Amino acid sequence: MKHDAFDVVVIGGGHAGAEAAHAAARAGAITALVTMRKDTIGVMSCNPAIGGLGKGHLVREIDAMGGIMGLAADMSGIQFRLLNRRKGPAVRGPRTQSDRALYKAAIQFFLAAQEGLTVIEGEVADLVLADGRIAGVELSDGAIIPAGSVVLTTGTFLNGVIHIGDQKTAGGRMGDRPSVRLADRLRALDLPLGRLKTGTPPRLRASSIAWEKLEMQQADDEPALFSFLSDRPHVRQIACGITYTNQQTHDIINDNLSRSAMYGGHIEGIGPRYCPSIEDKVVRFADKASHQIFLEPEGLDCDTVYPNGISTSLPEDVQRSYVHSIVGLEKAEILQPGYAIEYDFVDPQNLDPSLQLRAIPGLFLAGQINGTTGYEEAAAQGLMAGLNAALRARNSRSVILSRAQAYIGVMIDDLVTRGVAEPYRMFTSRAEYRLSLRADNADQRLTEMAGALGLITQERQQRFAVKMDDLALGRGFLEASLFTPREAAEAGIAISQDGQRRSGMDLLAFPDVDLAHMDVLIPAFSQCTPATREQLATEALYKTYVARQQRDVSAMLRDEAQQIPSHIDYSDIGGLSNELKGKLQRVRPVTVAQAARIDGMTPAALALILSRIRQDERRSA
Amino acid sequence: MHTIFALATARGKSGVAVIRISGPAAHEIGSGLAGSLPQAGQAGLRVLRNATGAVLDQALVLRFDEPRSFTGEDVVELQLHGSIAVIRAIEAAISGTGLARMAEAGEFTRRALLNGNLDLAQVEGLSDLIAAETEAQRRQAQELFSGAMRGFADMCRHDLVRATALIEATIDFADEDVPVDVSPEVGALIDKVISRIAEQLGGYQAAERIRSGFEVAIIGPPNAGKSTLINKIAGRDIAITSEFAGTTRDVLEVRIDLNGLPVTFLDTAGLRESDDVIERIGVARARSRASGADLRILLIDGLQAQGDFDPGIAVDLRYMTKSDVTGSGISAVNGDGIDQLLADVSRILMDRVSGATLASHERHRQALERAHALMMVGRSCFIEGSVGAEILALHLRDAVGALDSLIGRVDVEAVLGEIFAQFCIGK
């Protein structure tokens, strides 16, 4: 059987695949999403939550570019909480618990509604290449789908192996087959594959938990949503329970350590340091008497609870006994045991910054296959891979977000430049310009660009225009007039009488000055919407620091503009250490700025590379 | 990258002369001249011949393989007989291969820097070492060359990374089992780094003086014996002396090694009111040089009643001269008390350099000042609690950036690594 030709074929229907397919279709590409099972598209395989610190920023950015994750999270959100609410606005991260069923339904709804997007059920068994470039995919039934570009999002399915104690089964997720043939094919292509590991906790029956004994965590009274299009949650909000491990729990785990897949030596993949299994926590932090567990309901009408904090690869009977040692879980029924899963990933240093595999033009990779962890990281890569696959299919220039522009840019640059040593997760501390990369201004950073690429709807365009107008109006009020210290003092602002005249914006930058002061000083300012006022206060707070960082940003962008020709031969640049030569050959940085971020790079080595570029330019001139 | 070569010893007649060849063709050139090269890191006696087979010299040949050489490249060193003609002949033979060119000044060191064999502070230390004239200078340069500056910067960086990690942990892992209040440790770390940097800056002036030398001005009324004293210190007649007051008009300098310290003594015009335009200029110069000097010695003519002479500027040491006539004080004529005078100067200067630190170059001072200023801003923000953790983290990162000009660069992986080693992250 032969299918119609597509501009873009996306393999996989997880968070990366769904976002990739939707983005490619939005960008105007005739797109197919191929998945083993249609009904698992948009499944949350791990914890039932979206967002968090750094991750919430990613979701806002995906949304600002017209993506679907933020909207799906808002439609399914059952416990919205803004993390770091008491810290600076730049490091606040929206998060929600999601109803699994509602989330999946929302994603499937958006994919079905997207013009130019077809979902095909089938297992991709092979990639079709022509002249070393991607030409399509072959399904396990032998059918060929011709494609201009292909986005591969295999998640944990590539050679997936599930471990429970010493039991080992091949699988991409509990209950699903792994992609073995595709993994063999990728091995045959001589791609540098590595092995990573992640894990999940046992799932508990909600009605078997003694909730009355537990401390409960409520949703925020004023929920912070993800999408710039959303105004309020769609469904009822619920609370999560909190409990703790204790000495008895730790004793049970310690006594059975050798029976864990991890400590029994069955696992070779590297797990994330920031998401350790309960056995890891007990061993590595032996002096801690207890660890916190969040009991997260998986949905509004669902009897399953996700106990966040006790992922494990211990055998089932041990899982049962340590769960029962925990307050509130004495009689908890395990619906599905926890497990560790190992899977293949491709060293992302083999990708160019558009997420295209350098060795096979037209083949884009996104999500866990690139060594990341997390739904949000996967979706953000999916968005960029899908977009760039579509752009390539129509011979347009790829879109690369810089580190000064978006968390997405930070993440992709980290991946392709530095590679990964453990599953990569977004943190705000990875973003050196985080004071300007805020969740509240993701649209200001990205929506206009997304609009020019045709990625966003008219509704979003309009909403964005209204927000920008309101911001401009408010900024105008705050900057229009200058106030003497005396005038400020009359408005209740304690300030040194230094004779310096200051604008509303300048005054708002002082720690003790708030919006109420502005209303006294500039009555017209109260016309602006609460969101606008809040955002202008944030702008004022960071103004001086953002200006200070602007010099670094300009320097970086200058280096970013200095391209390194792809044919440069590092082996023949004298004065470069062999170690650096090896790294440069592997990463093949596209710009001088990217080269500068390679681990161990020195200014002197950069100078050598620059002088080689100049030499080559002179020679060819 | 070209292969370079140069004479590493001073040009001229000498016992041994060393020619160094560095670069990808160094071994090829070396074996061409010597027939064969010894093992890497070893020396061997070889007969050197030119392309036509003519014997040029018998030499000790050393071979180094990259990266274990001074430059980090392949290196061959030829220890020749120190004859001008031999050196010329070998240089001609090397040039004749067409494989190497003469090195530019400092090029071997520059390559060592490029290849990461030396850091920037070590290069400065090496250049100080080569220029060192006195024992104190040698010790100072040796320390810098040994990589002590990197050690200092690494120590500060370690504490700053730790402080940043503590702050970042409260930001990025707010939902996890991390301590909520990290301020006592962060405060202690900030103070520790500030005091280390302040200590470096406090000793900078003394260190810089060891490197560039001290100035000791000899001042006093006319005819007090200043020029006689400077001639005595120099051990030769550099200043004209006469019985006429106002003989010295300009400032004369004598540089000596005083117990290991480089010290320049200044002979100045006698301080008095004068109608003579030239002498007036000389007196003004004397005052200005003396006030800029590290130490001022006031000489009083023991034959005149000048006990209450006021030079107009503060002085550190005071002596009555002409003891050969008066019987008390010092005399540059018979040498009375001169050793004591030099010992007094030496004692004061030694006392001053005892606080000398590693930072001895203007570049070091600037980087340290910048880091210090940023740390102080960060510290006051921290104490007042006026800014959020994300802004405090920015100040600390910038401070590390300032220290970066002494060493490498801070890296978010280092911060995260510290967090993960310390706290149990992960629900």
Image (cartoon, coloured by chain):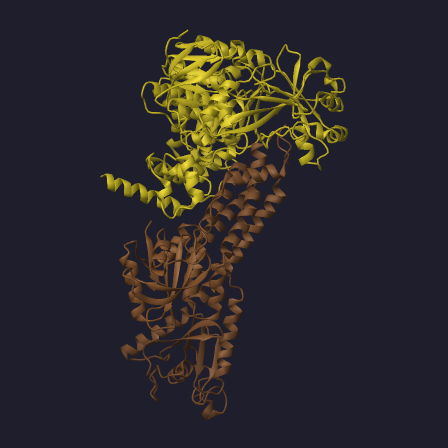
Q: Quadrant of residue B213?
A: bottom left
The residue nearer to you, when weighing A33 against A382, is: A33
Image spot of residue A390 (x, y percent): 37, 18
The x and y percentages for residue A16 are 48, 20
Q: Residue furthest top?
A: A1
Which residue reaches farthest left? A621
Q: Would residue A373 appear left or right of B321 to someone viewing this image? A: right
In the rendered image, the quadrant that contains the C terminus of chain B is: top right
Q: Position of residue A481 (x, y in %)?
A: 38, 33
The picture places residue A488, in percent across and down from the top left corner, at 46, 36
Above/below status of A381 relative to B385: above
Q: Colour of chain B?
A: brown
Say if residue A484 shows up in the picture.
no
Write down the quadrant of residue A351 in the picture: top left
> Would residue A434 be seen by someone viewing this image from the given angle?
yes
Q: Nearer the viewer, residue B302 or A109?
A: A109
| Residue drawn at the location 66% of the way across and 14% of the way down | A304
On screen, residue A184 versus residue A464, left or right, reads right
Chain A: colour as depicted = yellow
Give the vertical position of B305 relative to B23 (above or below). below
Q: Residue furthest front?
A: B53
Compared across the picture, whether B131 is left or right of A313 comes to: left
Q: Is residue B278 left or right of residue A5?
A: left
Q: Nearer the viewer, residue B342 or A186?
A: A186
